[in-house]
Image: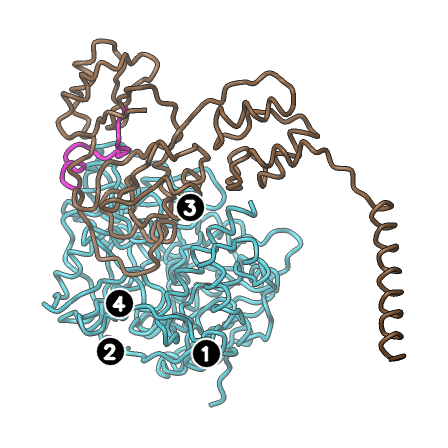
């Protein structure tokens, strides 16, 4: 019996001692944290995508509270998140410019030629170091899907060896842009209807046509037919000036290869 | 005979008997030559001529005002058809000058051989002539030779090593050069010693080339400052760092150059090119390559103008029906080619044609941690760990495992029982590591 009592009293005394120590330590070493950090963190998407320029969502939340980083810095969260953060911080909300990833190559595996058989590491970045793997085009998509694996929001799906971006999911964080070794993904601001050249090939028309069905062959029809002088050719590639373009769609309808596409924002 | 060597490495099947006894021969003139403006490590050249211009054999047609670079010359007389992007053996595609070849009456007589007294030439003069001749390392990496011959102030070069190892299986071009042009080789070595101020010269030759060792030994018997060193036949014995370790016992520090241990290493082919540049004033416009492999009808050692398309060379040597892969360089470090329009460049040491049953199509399997790659890596790295870090895209940690010391010799991939493309993963890792550290 005395043994049981001894155990209870000694354990009781020990726990009382540690409880006192802990509460003293808690008060003495307390870190004052602005409660707004936690509240902002709860509003942020939590993907740690890095598009804001900070290492993580927490780093951004701290930067907003302590260093006065802009409340609309979270690109992935968009306007909604920006508004909520502005409320928490008690400042006027500024609109986030919504950009999405646009892939500047329109040829899937079945629409372009291969120049060799590639056996090796199946990632775009490794393949690009060995003369661009099997792709005959030295500008276009390699098709191993590094961007798909990199996307934190599941917005990219590889279809026939070409990334398809789901604009409703894409937040414009730019991770795919950084990971693409051929730099064919760009972040763009889209209106309701847009026309874009979905090709980056600088090959001459003859060669471009031989190796790819979807390539811009620099025929100049878009330049000729554009009523607003928004199209021009440079280095065997058509360009459309988004400022002059009135989205009439004539270039899209006259393009013989389908290199000019209609993009619905 | 006791032979020197380095630690680790591999013993691939040599396969040199296919072409080792074939004398160096010339090929019929190609109808056009393709001269890439970037054949060397460093800044690419700018063309000095225009479309439709007539060019003479040996005329300088591209140059650039950068230290790490060297000019390119027209390998044959002809007319420039165009300057455009063209398949390139190491870069995939690059700007090249395409020349339509014309009959040349003067031919080789354009250059007459003069006896040259090396002691009358200043090191500066030798470097200048080497640069003007457009000489780049002919072992494969094509590093501009005049840069190697210009030790920065404060670095004292005491030894020059001439690399006659030719440790890549199949290749025999350097062996033939040592057999047929040993004297030029020796002159080149002396010129390099004069340019760098080195007192001692070594010629490292693997002991599977006994005849070459004999010839070189008899030629250098009276010379105290030059020594022929027989080396164990082992891959990669011809790697710069391995060669220095084997011959001089010195270790190049991590991230350093042979210069840091007072050594300059040059290929035997480069030495002969230097000899021609000094004695005849002839630029580097042709080179000896080995065309070999079981997919070739007539394996040979050929003297070809730089810029000759693969197609012409393989037409001359004959391609068998079961040929599957064409590799420029040796089987260990060579690069597979996708187009027969690819030209021979300054760093091309051979063309290897493999047949269907020689090309492995095994699937990659998981790593079983057998550490064979670790046992064979001549640089003492952990290829398996590096490959895993690369697969996990943990770029920052690659530095802790000294990824930049990898010489990409391919021993790890050769011995890997799981057929993991380790070298390719490491190449990718190096590229990403460079991006985050720069």
Tag 4 residue: B290
Instruction: Decide which of B59, B385 is in the foreground and name it.
Output: B385
Q: Are the numbered discs 4 and 2 placed on the same chain, yes or no?
A: yes
The local secondary structure at tag 1 comes to loop
Q: Are the numbered discs 3 and 1 placed on the same chain, yes or no?
A: no
Instruction: Decide which of A195, B194 is in the foreground and name it.
Output: A195
Measure how far apart labels 4 and 2 are at the Cα level. Answer: 11 Å
Say how many tags the image has: 4
The earlier-in-sequence mark between 2 and 1 is 2
Instruction: Look at the numbered discs 2 and 1 and tell me whether their residues touch, using CB distance below 8 Å.
Output: no
Measure how far apart labels 2 and 3 are at the Cα level. Answer: 54 Å
Tag 2 residue: B21
Tag 1 residue: B370
Tag 3 residue: A150
Chain assignment, label 4: B
Measure how far apart labels 1 and 4 are at the Cα level. Answer: 36 Å
Q: Which chain gets the brown colouring?
A: A
**Percent from the top left, x then y, of residue B280?**
35, 54
The local secondary structure at tag 2 comes to loop
Residue at 19% x, 22% y is A252
The earlier-in-sequence mark between 4 and 2 is 2
Numbered range of the magenta stretch: A196-211
Measure how far apart labels 3 and 1 are at the Cα level. Answer: 31 Å
Magenta stretch holds residue B353: no
Work out whether residue B219 can be spotted.
no
The local secondary structure at tag 4 comes to strand
Q: Are the numbered discs 2 and 1 placed on the same chain, yes or no?
A: yes
Q: Residue B422's image quarter? A: bottom left
Measure how far apart labels 3 and 4 are at the Cα level. Answer: 44 Å
Chain assignment, label 3: A
């Amino acid at each position: 019996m005395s043994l049981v009592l001894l155990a209870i009293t000694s354990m009781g005394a020990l726990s009382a001692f540690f409880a006192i120590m802990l509460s003293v330590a808690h008060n003495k070493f307390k870190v004052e944290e602005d409660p707004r950090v936690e509240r902002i963190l709860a509003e942020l998407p939590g993907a740690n995508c890095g598009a804001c320029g900070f290492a993580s969502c927490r780093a951004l939340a701290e930067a907003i509270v302590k260093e006065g980083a802009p409340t609309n810095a979270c690109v992935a969260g968009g306007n909604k998140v920006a508004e909520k953060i502005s409320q928490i911080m008690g400042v006027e909300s500024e609109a986030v410019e919504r950009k999405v990833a646009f892939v500047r190559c329109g040829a899937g595996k079945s629409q372009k030629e291969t120049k060799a058989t590639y056996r090796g590491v199946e990632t775009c970045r490794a393949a690009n170091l060995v003369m661009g793997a099997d792709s005959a085009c030295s500008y276009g998509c390699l098709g191993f899907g590094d961007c798909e694996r990199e996307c934190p929001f599941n917005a990219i799906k590889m279809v026939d060896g070409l990334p398809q971006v789901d604009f409703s999911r894409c937040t414009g964080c730019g991770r795919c842009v950084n990971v693409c070794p051929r730099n064919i993904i760009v972040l763009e601001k889209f209106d309701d209807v847009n026309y874009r050249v979905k090709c980056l090939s600088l090959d001459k028309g003859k060669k471009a046509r031989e190796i790819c069905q979807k390539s811009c062959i620099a025929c100049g029809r878009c330049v000729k037919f554009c009523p607003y002088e928004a199209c021009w050719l440079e280095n065997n590639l058509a360009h459309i000036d988004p400022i002059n373009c009135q989205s009439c769609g004539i270039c899209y309808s006259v393009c013989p290869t389908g290199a000019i596409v209609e993009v619905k924002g | 005979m006791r032979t020197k060597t380095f630690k680790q490495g591999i013993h691939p099947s040599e396969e040199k008997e296919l072409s080792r006894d074939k004398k160096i021969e010339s090929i019929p003139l190609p109808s056009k030559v393709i001269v890439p403006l970037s054949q060397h490590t460093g800044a690419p050249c700018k063309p000095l001529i225009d479309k439709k211009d007539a060019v003479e054999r040996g005329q300088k047609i591209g140059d650039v005002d950068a230290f790490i670079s060297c000019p390119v010359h027209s390998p044959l007389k002809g007319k420039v058809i165009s300057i455009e992007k063209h398949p390139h053996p190491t870069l995939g595609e690059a700007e090249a000058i395409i020349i339509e070849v014309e009959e040349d009456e003067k031919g080789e007589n354009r250059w007459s051989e003069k006896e040259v007294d090396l002691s009358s030439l200043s090191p500066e003069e030798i470097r200048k002539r080497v640069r003007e001749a457009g000489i780049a390392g002919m072992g494969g990496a094509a590093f501009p030779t005049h840069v190697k011959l210009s030790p920065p102030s404060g670095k004292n070069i005491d030894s020059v090593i001439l690399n006659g190892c030719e440790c890549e299986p199949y290749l025999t071009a350097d062996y033939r050069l040592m057999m047929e042009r040993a004297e030029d080789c020796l002159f080149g070595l002396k010129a390099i010693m004069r340019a760098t101020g080195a007192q001692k010269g070594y010629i490292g030759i693997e002991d599977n080339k006994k005849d070459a060792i004999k010839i070189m030994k008899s030629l250098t018997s009276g010379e105290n400052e030059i020594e022929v060193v027989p080396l164990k036949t082992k891959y990669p014995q011809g790697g710069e760092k391995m060669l220095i370790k084997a011959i001089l016992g010195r270790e190049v520090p991590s991230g350093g150059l042979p210069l840091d241990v007072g050594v300059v290493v040059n290929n035997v082919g480069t030495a002969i090119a230097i000899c021609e540049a000094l004695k005849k004033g002839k630029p580097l416009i042709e080179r000896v390559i080995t065309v070999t492999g079981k997919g070739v009808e007539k394996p040979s050692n050929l003297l070809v103008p730089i810029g000759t398309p693969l197609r012409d060379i393989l037409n001359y040597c004959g391609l068998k029906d079961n040929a599957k892969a064409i590799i420029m360089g040796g089987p260990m470090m060579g690069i597979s080619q996708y187009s027969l329009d690819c030209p021979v460049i300054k760093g091309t040491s051979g063309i290897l044609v493999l047949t269907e049953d020689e090309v492995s199509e095994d699937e990659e399997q998981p790593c079983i941690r057998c550490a064979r790659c670790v046992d064979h890596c001549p640089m003492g790295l952990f290829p398996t760990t590096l490959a895993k870090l690369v697969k996990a895209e943990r770029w920052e940690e690659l530095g802790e495992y000294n990824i930049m010391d990898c010489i990409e010799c391919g021993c790890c991939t050769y011995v890997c029982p799981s057929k993991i493309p380790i070298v390719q993963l490491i190449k990718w890792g190096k590229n990403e590591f460079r991006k985050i550290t720069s």
